[in-house]
Image (spheres, grey):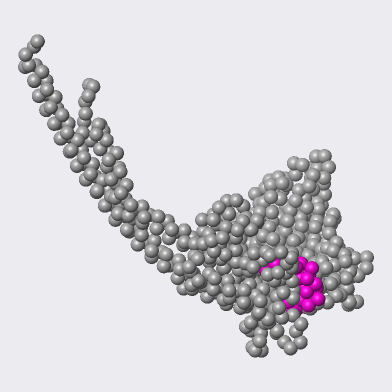
Amino acid sequence: MAGLNIPGVTDRYKTSETVDKLMQIERIPLTREQNQLEEYKTQQNAWREINSQLSSLRETTRDLYSFDNPFNSKICTSNNEDAITAEATRSADIQSFKVDVIKTASSDRFMSDDLPSDFEVPKGLYTYKVSGKQVSFNWKGGSLKAFSDALNKRSNGVIKSMVIGATAGKKTLLIESLATGKENRLIFEGAAKDLAMNSGMITASKPSNNNSFSISQNSIQPVNFSNSEDESKSLPTLSTARTQLTNGKIHVDPRGAFQLSVPQNVASNSNNHITFTISSNKITDITEEMNKEPVEPVLPDSGFAEYSGIVVQNSPSESLYTNEIIEKEIVNPVTNKNILYAVMNDGSEKLISTPSILSEGEVSIDLPLSEYEGIKGILVKNSNTSYSFDVSSFAVYDYSTDTGYTPNHAVSEAGDAIIKYEGITITRPTNRIDDVVPEITLNLHDTTDRAATINIKPDKEASKNALINFVGKYNQVVAKINVLSQSKNEIIEELDYLSDDEKDKLRKQLGMFQTDFSLTSIKSNMQSIISASYKFDEYSTLSLLSQIGISTNATGYSGSYSASKLRGYLEIDEKKLDAALEKDMDSVKMLFGYDSDGDMIVDTGIAYKLDKQINAYTQSGGILALKTSTLDSKIKSSEKQIARLEDQMNAKEADLRQKYSSMEGSLNSLEAQQNSISNFTRQNSPRN
């Protein structure tokens, strides 16, 4: 439909363009306010950046005079670092001494025999102990590798396990204690000891500090026990009468029992272990004979008398026996693997488990007294009717010095470190020794052929790096202040360590705070502090920062005028700085912070004064915080103003568009009427 015109949709009279141009004029206040908001935000970001850089400089200055200042750091050197190194605290004296490493501390590291690759670790409770700590867990049975992994997961810093491929088709288990020292022996208990024995890792041995207490008739206490409720009253009661002492061993017949006293000096040491063996012997059950005995009474023959060939028979004995049937009680056999008990001081009995006593013949018992505190005796109760037992003599060992077994394949055994310090022989359980030389920790790595020399010196490198870092932070702050407070483009161009993007960003901030004197004030104060003299005592030869090679002209003028050297940046003369640190580290330290009134608190110096000066600007509620908070208020106010103006502009634009749309509609209507009149006139005019 050519010529169709819809007001507000088509733009025949360019009303939309007219409205846009009118709105551009109307939006001038809004645009001005938006630009102002952007400026506020840019200023706020600039203040935050200078605040961040000043805070970083302050932290650096604090490090130069605080307790952790680098001038107190010490460095240790050794002429045989493969054998011994050292670490020094900040309080260590500057000194030199000699140490001879005779032996390094070692831990128990035991290997098993070569085992088949399909070797299975049986289920059981596996317990490993080192230095009072232990790893104990129930293992359900499985491969050697799975067992090693399970042990490592539970090692808790006590032990470490490893499976090593020894030869083709063979594997070896390595168990390692993680604590060094001869008193930190690796102890196997329960299933762990059985595995170590069966895998050839260890062999039982007679304790080297054997304190056997002999079995004598005097040490055996007679005991008699009534039959339990589930036992036949016809069974013999448990009694010492059914035991025999022979050659230091006790043979216990069925229904035999005895109690052996534990000497007080043995029981009082919780480190002691009591060891002995019990052998079981399968014999004919005593109940078989008991069940053969007749129930009816057997009366003796009444006898006879003979005289001169005449025999006179006595009358039969009379009894109350009747022919009534008497039921015979069948005595049932008794089988019980619980035969060993610890008798406590309060008279109670604590079972010592021997689950395999009836099946293995001989069982070795290792009784840790730490688990039987208050023990006074060992009780054997053989309630069995078809087993006798032989109990060996008792031995005692202190597991802190002797484990009671010998390793077959020891990679290393627990032992103390032995050193000679200035000719004095010293032993320690660890290779990290911190109690021989005050404030010095010695780290032993290997033995020495001859005494190694340890030197303790100031850490000049740490001090130098700290001062270089300080100068770098200081110059960054000065550069930022110069950019914000001046409008010279060369200030940015001479900062050749900046990238192009960083320079572009600074150009937007150039001269932003030319009229704000707070920046020029802090720069002036910092320069005054840097150039001031600090004479910490009447004998001090260092009092100026320039004397250690740090100043605004440390490298010297090149002969021509240099504007950059007048902007307040610090320079470093490394040779001069190195010489100052080498010659008089303490004086350099005092230059940055010292106590002037004798109260043991630093109260002056370059770093101290810079810290206090910067703190006034960066602290909460300080000068810079006030700047940013003021801008916060302005930003919020501007954002409200912008929102109000935007609402006004939207309403104004809607009103204009509605009015111009109505005008356009009116014009369209008039044009339509004109066209109608023209058409009517044309149709009714006379034709030629």
Tell me if residue 404 is in the magenta stretch.
no
Above or below 672: residue 576 = below
**Left or right of residue 682: residue 505:** right
Residue at image coords 76%, 55%: 175
Residue farthest to the right? 449
Q: In the image, residue 632 lies at what x, y percent?
A: 41, 64
| Viewer-side residue, 151 vs 55 | 55
Tell me if residue 587 is in the magenta stretch.
yes
Total numbered badges shown on the rendered structure: 0
**Segment colored magenta:** 569-588
Residue at image coords 81%, 53%: 111
Residue farthest to the front? 688
Q: Looking at the figure, which quarter contains the N terminus? A: top left
The answer to whether residue 293 shows anywhere in this view is no
Above or below 433: residue 139 = above
| Viewer-side residue, 106 vs 395 | 106
The answer to whether residue 661 shows anywhere in this view is yes
Give the image quarter of residue 448: bottom right
Residue at image coords 71%, 78%: 544
Q: In the image, residue 355 lies at what x, y percent?
A: 68, 56
| Viewer-side residue, 37 vs 26 | 26
Q: In the image, residue 502 lies at what x, y percent?
A: 58, 54
Query: Magenta span: helix, strand or loop, mainly?
Result: helix
| Viewer-side residue, 489 vs 243 | 489
